[in-house]
Image (spheres, rainbow, N blue to C red):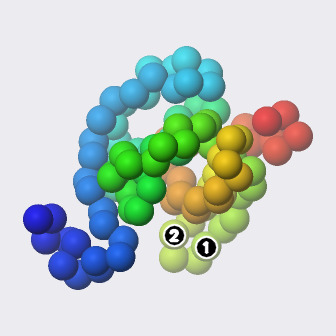
Amino acid sequence: MNPLHLLCPLSPFIARQEPFSCEHCQAEVKPLEKGSYRNHCPYCLFSKHVDLEGPGDRKSPCGGLMRPASLDQSGKKGWVIIHECTICGKKINNKAAQDDQIDKFDSELI
């Protein structure tokens, strides 16, 4: 059992550092070298709806692309990207990584 599951049984977190190909812009995305875990493309900011109960579980049956619907700035977290699934509409907040190209964010172009 994941030891983090004992601390927060309703929201399991499975740490994953995996490269992936972005299904929106086809960029080859490498894992973050420092800090947290990457769950979206740093170039187009799109993600994929793969998790159901918590980060890293890969249990979502949806599998839709998650568009960067908006940006928010949190004093503690810095920039936060609000992703919205293009299939089911679920919204998920994700902390932006240092190499994310948030300066190119334009909700009218997405």
Which quarter of the picture shows residue 1?
A: bottom left
Q: Secondary structure at mark 2?
A: loop
Kindly give the residue lying farthest to the bottom in the view shown.
7
Q: Is residue 72 above or below residue 86?
A: below
Front one among 28 and 1: 1
Quadrant, the C terminus: top right
Tags 1 and 2 in contact by the CB under 8 Å rule? yes
10 Å neighbourhood of mark 1: few (<14), some, or many (≥20)? few
10 Å neighbourhood of mark 2: few (<14), some, or many (≥20)? few
Front one among 65 and 38: 65
Q: Secondary structure at mark 1?
A: strand
Asked whether the viewer can see residue 102, the reply is: no
Residue under label 2: 77
Relative image position of residue 61 (x, y in whole percent): 48, 43
Q: Amino acid at mark 1?
A: Ser
Q: Is residue 47 above or below residue 70?
A: above
Relative image position of residue 33 (x, y in whole percent): 29, 42
Which quarter of the picture shows residue 26?
A: top right
Q: Which mark is residue 74?
A: 1
Q: Is residue 77 above or below residue 16?
A: below
Q: Amino acid at mark 2?
A: Lys
